[in-house]
Image (cartoon, rainbow, N blue to C red):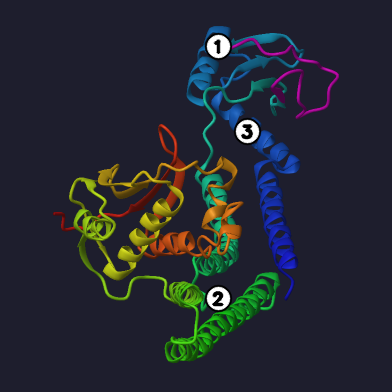
């Protein structure tokens, strides 16, 4: 059977059929009208031998009836052949109706049993708490076991395959483009697994092609840039100095852009740092900030990561703060908060609108006015976020108290702390 809904449907119908047949069998065993009449007739024969004869004193007949009532725990009433009450034990039972056929149920929970000596015995149902017999408990236990055994393989098989599919989706979402799931069976889940594998394969091919295009384009762009640099060096005497410096600045900007594209492509391809070591963030921030004459405050916090990448993230944030922060120097702070290491770089610029604080981390996105002035390529903050995530952290932008913007990188601290 290939269709999943048919498997579930047939399994449910089979279980319901088994339960129905079992309940019907139990009901048949629990009450059989003919067998019950035979039992009452046999009980009447036994009662004749147990009870005193009809001509025995009434006191003796009543004492015997009380003893039977205590032993059997049923309400009893004895009538003579004329329908007159002779003795009674237990609760009061419905009166005898002489015009009714033998072995019939009277009003309420009572039955009339005609005796062979002409008398009539009226008996009520058993009193006290009802306790199921062992056969009923065994039958119910067998039904429960049968249902459990029948439902377990199907549910286990379905949930196990769905769990593997969920894990594959999560791996793909986390960036593992090689994630695939095992295809089992020929039902809808198997078709879903095949569709997932095909989609993941197409996504992997597209991303790899995109990365290869970026890498090849970046590599090819550096060759003409090198030639332009050489030509510019040979033509120094015949070129206007200001124009020459402008060309050099453009070439440097292009070279930096190519380097950032290559780094972004590498960070996309590699999901974790390749060469890790314990790094003192306070010392690293002090070294990088000293290049621009900026002081660093805070405490020493050690993280595990790739030094060159973390240095690059700091350099990008400090450079961004100097570029847009006006004449005031940026402020750099390193501390530990809530089990995470933090690097905070604050500028004193005009600030960033709240609606754009997330978009500035997108590739090549620049605030209004920055593109016209030629400030930044739009990849600096993208690289900062990639590097932070590369180390299991995150970066966020918020408004600084007193004006300006505050960029905060949060990283997991190392096991060995300074």
Q: How crowded is mark 1: few (under 14 residues within 10 Å), some or many (20 or more)?
A: some
Name the residue rendered at 39%, 64% in the picture: 387
Which is more N-terminal, label 2 or label 3?
A: 3
Q: What element carries label 3?
A: helix
Residue hosting label 2: 181
Q: Mark 1 sits on what residue? A: 62
At which x and y percent is residue 172?
53, 69
**Secondary structure of residue under mark 2:** loop
Q: Nearer the viewer, residue 305 or 399?
A: 399
Crowd band around label 3 with a 10 angstrom C-alpha radius: few (<14), some (14–19), many (20+): some
Q: In which quarter of the image is residue 169?
A: bottom right
Magenta stretch: includes residue 106? yes
Name the image quarter holding residue 162. Answer: bottom right
Say if mark 3 contacts mark 1, CB within 8 Å. Answer: no
Residue nearest the viewer, comparing 203 with 225: 225
Task: Tell which residue pokes out farthest to the left in this image.
Answer: 418
**Where 80 falls versus 294 (above or below)?**
above
Mark 2 or 1, which is nearer the eye? 2
Task: Tell me which secondary structure the magenta stretch mostly adopts.
Answer: loop
The magenta segment is 90-112
- SS label for mark 1: helix
Residue 143 at x, y = what percent?
Answer: 58, 53
Marks 3 and 1 sit apart, C-alpha to C-alpha, by 18 Å
Q: If the image is split into quadrants, where does the N terminus sit? A: bottom right
Residue position marked by numbered label 3 in the rendering: 43
Among numbered discs 2 and 1, the one appearing first in the sequence = 1
Residue 153: in magenta span: no
In the foreground, 258 or 292: 292
């Amino acid at each position: 059977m290939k269709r999943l809904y048919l498997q579930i449907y047939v399994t449910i119908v089979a279980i319901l059929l088994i339960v129905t047949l079992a309940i019907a069998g139990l009901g048949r065993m629990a009450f059989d009208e003919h067998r019950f009449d035979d039992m009452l007739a046999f009980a009447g024969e036994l009662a004749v031998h147990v009870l005193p004869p009809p001509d025995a004193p009434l006191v003796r007949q009543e004492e015997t009836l009380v003893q039977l009532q205590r032993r059997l725990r049923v309400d009893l009433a004895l009538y003579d052949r004329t329908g007159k009450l002779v003795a009674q034990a237990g609760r009061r039972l419905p009166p005898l109706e002489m015009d009714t056929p033998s072995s019939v149920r009277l009003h309420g929970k009572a039955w009339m049993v005609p005796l062979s000596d002409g008398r009539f015995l009226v008996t009520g149902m058993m009193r006290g708490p009802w306790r199921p017999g062992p056969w009923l408990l065994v039958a119910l236990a067998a039904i429960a076991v049968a249902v459990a055994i029948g439902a377990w393989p199907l549910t286990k098989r379905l949930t196990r395959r769905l769990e593997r599919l969920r894990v594959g989706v999560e791996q793909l979402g986390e960036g593992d483009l090689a994630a695939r799931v095992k295809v089992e069976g020929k039902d809808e889940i198997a078709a879903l697994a095949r569709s997932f594998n095909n989609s993941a394969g197409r996504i992997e091919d597209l991303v790899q092609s995109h990365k290869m295009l970026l890498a090849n384009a970046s590599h090819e762009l550096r060759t003409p840039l090198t030639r332009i640099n050489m030509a510019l060096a040979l033509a120094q005497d015949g070129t206007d100095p200001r124009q020459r410096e402008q060309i050099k600045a453009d070439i440097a900007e292009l070279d930096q852009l190519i380097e950032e594209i290559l780094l972004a492509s590498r960070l996309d391809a590699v999901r974790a740092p390749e060469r890790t070591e314990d790094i003192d963030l306070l010392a690293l921030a002090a070294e990088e900030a000293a290049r621009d004459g900026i002081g660093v405050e805070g405490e020493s916090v050690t993280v595990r990561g790739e030094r060159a990448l973390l240095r690059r993230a700091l350099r990008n944030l400090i450079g961004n703060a100097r570029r847009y922060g006006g004449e005031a120097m940026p402020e750099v702070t390193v501390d530990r908060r809530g089990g995470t290491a933090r690097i905070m770089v604050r500028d004193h610029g005009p600030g960033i609108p709240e609606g754009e604080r997330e978009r500035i981390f997108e590739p090549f996105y620049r605030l209004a006015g920055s593109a016209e002035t030629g400030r930044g390529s739009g990849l600096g903050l993208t690289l900062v976020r990639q590097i932070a995530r590369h180390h299991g952290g995150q970066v966020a932008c918020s408004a600084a108290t007193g004006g300006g913007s505050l960029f905060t990188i949060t990283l997991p601290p190392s096991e060995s702390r300074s």
